[in-house]
Amino acid sequence: MKSHSYKKTFLFVLFAALVMWGLGQWITLPSSARQTEPREINPDTLKKTKLDEAKRQFRLSARQKKDPDSPLPSLLTLYDDNQFQAVSDQIVGLSDDQKNAPLHLLHGNALAFLGKHEEAAGAYQEAYRRAETLQEQAAALANFGLLYSTKRVWKEGIVWTERALAIDRQTGDRQAEGADLALLGTLYYQAGDTAKGSEAHMEALKIAEAISDRRLMARQLASIGNLHYLDRSYETALDYQQKALKLYRELGNPIGEAVSLTSLSFIYKDRKDFAKALSFQSDALAIHQAGDDLSSQSNAHINFALIYQDQGELEKAIGSAEKALKIREEMNDLPGMANVEGTIGTIHQSFGNLPQAIQHLEKSKELFQRGGASQQIHIVDQRIQILRDQMQN
């Protein structure tokens, strides 16, 4: 059973891969089946690239204190070196008078990368309260929006990002305006407004082209390609993703490259060109494996399973999904394990194996219960009941 909701999740996963850091078993294909030659990718370099890409999304203040005693320059050096805990500890140790808007913005970003979202929100509130310029206000608001987006709280994210956009347009900051629109494009779509999402991404792309921001341009090409894919406009989606892939490679961004390779894999899967779908997904997995990114490796195996499902290859589909499950188990990722079990159930359902589908959905429900995910439990319960009703009829 295929669903639009899975494609919606697919779009968010691709977005999140470019925004947040941290966010296997290699499937070997003949070299002739792969779209690109294997290449060495240093895991440390790849991890640094992830962090650098994510850090570009979170704003800092452009204002530097001329006071030679200001702690900001040394703290920015620590931040550039990804020493987020050290940044946080030193800012906490400062007196209240020393903590201006630039420091609170920096502290919020460090806390966000440490996974302390509530504390990060508090730092951004202080940054907004103490802002001396409109640009600092916009930075705090934009970071709020990005923080909500990583928590999947779409409507709140929209509210804060629209406020940042209004200020950035007022001050004429085109780069910030483009970044706001890029985020809004994803937020609008996730909130259910596809038209506004597409419009925002297109406007962001125009700005990126006008100011020659190639990183923003690549992200928007990929995002617009994903939206065309969801509308089943495969030729247009293919054109955008190929342009995005080319740019990501020119920029030396393997994370973006892997995202576009996965998108191309989905396009070819839906066009029933399974050889190319497997090939592009294989290339994406190679990048995730090189970077020791277990979560992305697990996602890649699920993508292989979906390709095999569409091919009618039940055994291969289940085999790939089980590889994904093994990785999630090694990570002790209960929500991830639950989602994979649900996918295995869906695969069995698509082949008419309803008892096996129910069995895996029950496992999914149990894992969600252990993780306290009440909303997902309700959804899985409904699916189980539907399948039981089908078996009785």
Image (cartoon, helix red, strand yellow):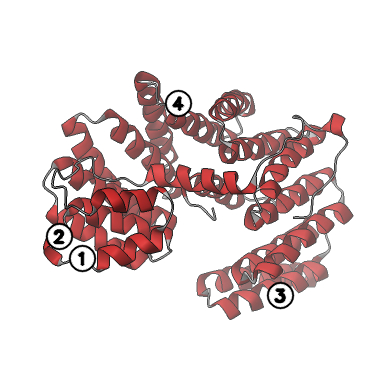
Residue indicated by mark 3: 363
Residue indicated by mark 4: 214
Query: Disc 3 vs disc 4: which is toward the camera?
Result: 4
Q: Amino acid at mark 1?
A: Leu
Q: CA distance from mark 2 to mark 3?
A: 53 Å
Task: Report helix, strand or loop for mark 1.
Answer: loop
Residue indicated by mark 2: 98
Q: CA distance from mark 2 to mark 4?
A: 37 Å
Q: Position of residue 228 (x, y in %)?
A: 55, 32
Residue indicated by mark 1: 94
Earlier residue among tags 1 and 3: 1
Q: Are marks 2 and 1 in contact (CB under 8 Å)?
A: yes
Q: Is residue 137 left or right of residue 6?
A: left
Residue 41: image quadrant is top right
Residue 368: image quadrant is bottom right
Residue pictured at 63% horizontal, 51% vertical: 3
Q: Residues within 10 Å of mark 1 (few under 14, many from 20)?
A: few
Earlier residue among tags 1 and 4: 1
Q: Amino acid at mark 3?
A: Lys
Q: Are marks 2 and 3 in contact (CB under 8 Å)?
A: no
Residue pictured at 21% horizontal, 32% vertical: 169
Task: Report helix, strand or loop for mark 4.
Answer: helix
Task: Report helix, strand or loop for mark 3.
Answer: helix
Earlier residue among tags 2 and 4: 2
Earlier residue among tags 2 and 3: 2
Which residue is nearer to you in this view: 52 or 124?
Answer: 52
